[in-house]
């Protein structure tokens, strides 16, 4: 009787005893307070720092801005960053899917250790990662020396080295985006398709891939954005040759060291616009893919 009285006073139970859900009742404080805290944190952490870039570029005219970002050295640094970040993100999308598949679908000794090591690039200082990757891929390193001995140029101080560094820092974003979605895929649908004679490739293409495609796009976008702005792990392995292996963040640092704050601000603003467009397009494609998956 006490339990009935207790539940009858619950905001989730109507007077007639039927269950209901009151959207005004929440564990978190009301909408007004919650949205206020959200906007305050968003402004302090994201909006105000980004707005400072636009504020710093207020002295720039449109002609000055385009004159700065269309310099050959600047354009080449953008091209190097975009090309290497795109290639690294595509590799991460494929390899991240395979790694997430292994972590979700198989049981093996050391699985927990491997699962924890996926997040190591998050915690490892990027400078340490850059030094370690450079020592491995240089001519005198373990990997670079082996490749040089068989006639393959060592990756260090080339664009291949930049891609390796970006793969290192971007792979956790893809794995952690796909892994929880893959865990929720209904295995019964796969079993039913297998019983009906579908091949493993067909099962993956028609059942699994539509479910994980939005997560793959999310991981790709996050990895691409991180790779575009990566500095610490890339600066050691890139070689920093103008027009060849010089990335845009390094060029910004070079302009700041020369006290050319106007050029540095213009290049930073250009990178901000590129990153925003890439993330916007990724979210747009992800939304359409999720909508199509829901319609199915």
Image (cartoon, grey):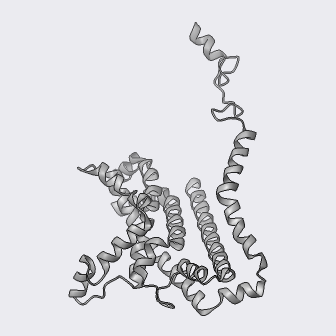
Residue drawn at the location 34% of the way across and 60% of the way down: 200
Q: How many marks?
A: 0
Determine whether 24 is above or below 257 in the image.
Answer: above
Residue 168 picture location, percent across and down = 40, 68
| Residue 22 in the figure: left or right of residue 119 | right
| Residue 42 in the figure: left or right of residue 290 | right
Residue drawn at the location 41% of the way across and 73% of the way down: 165
Residue 100 picture location, percent across and down = 38, 57
The answer to whether any part of residue 199 appears in the image is: no
Residue drawn at the location 38% of the way across and 53% of the way down: 193
Residue 68 picture location, percent across and down = 67, 87
| Residue 209 in the figure: left or right of residue 18 | left
Q: Nearer the viewer, residue 104 or 112?
A: 112
Q: Nearer the viewer, residue 138 or 17?
A: 138
- Check the picture and name the quadrant holding the N terminus: top right
Q: Would you identify the image quadrant in which residue 53 lies?
A: bottom right
Q: Nearer the viewer, residue 148 or 131?
A: 131
Residue found at the far top of this picture: 1
The answer to whether any part of residue 3 appears in the image is: yes
Residue drawn at the location 58% of the way across and 79% of the way down: 252
Q: Nearer the viewer, residue 189 or 119?
A: 119
- Check the picture and name the quadrant holding the C terminus: bottom right
Determine whether 124 is above or below 189 in the image.
Answer: below
Q: Would you identify the image quadrant in which residue 208 lies?
A: bottom left
Residue 171 picture location, percent across and down = 42, 64
Determine whether 240 is above or below 39 in the image.
Answer: below
């Amino acid at each position: 009787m006490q339990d009935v009285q207790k539940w009858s006073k619950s905001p989730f139970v109507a007077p007639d005893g039927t269950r209901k859900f009151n959207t005004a009742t929440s564990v978190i404080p009301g909408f007004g307070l919650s949205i206020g805290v959200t906007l305050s944190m968003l402004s302090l952490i994201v909006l105000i720092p980004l707005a400072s870039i636009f504020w710093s570029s207020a002295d720039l005219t449109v002609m000055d801005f385009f004159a700065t970002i269309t310099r050959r050295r600047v354009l080449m640094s953008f091209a190097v960053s975009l090309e290497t970040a795109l290639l690294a993100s595509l590799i991460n999308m494929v390899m991240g899917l395979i790694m997430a598949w292994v972590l979700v679908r198989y049981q093996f000794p050391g699985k927990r250790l491997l699962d924890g090591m996926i997040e190591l690039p998050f915690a490892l200082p990027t400078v340490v990662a850059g030094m370690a990757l450079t020592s491995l891929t240089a001519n005198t390193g373990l990997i670079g020396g082996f490749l040089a001995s068989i006639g393959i140029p060592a990756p260090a101080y080339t664009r291949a080295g930049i891609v390796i560094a970006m793969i290192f820092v971007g792979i956790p974003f893809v794995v952690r985006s796909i892994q929880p979605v893959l865990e929720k895929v209904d295995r019964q649908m796969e079993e039913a398709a297998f019983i009906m004679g579908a091949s493993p490739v067909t099962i993956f293409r028609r059942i699994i891939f539509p479910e994980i495609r939005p997560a793959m796009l999310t991981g790709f976008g996050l990895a691409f954005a991180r790779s575009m702005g990566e500095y610490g792990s890339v600066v050691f392995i890139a070689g920093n040759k103008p027009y060849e292996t010089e990335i845009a963040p390094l060029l910004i640092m070079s302009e700041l060291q020369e006290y050319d704050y106007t050029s540095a601000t213009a290049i930073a603003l250009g990178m901000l616009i590129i990153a925003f467009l890439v993330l916007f397009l990724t979210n747009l494609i992800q939304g359409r893919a999720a909508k199509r998956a829901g319609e199915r």
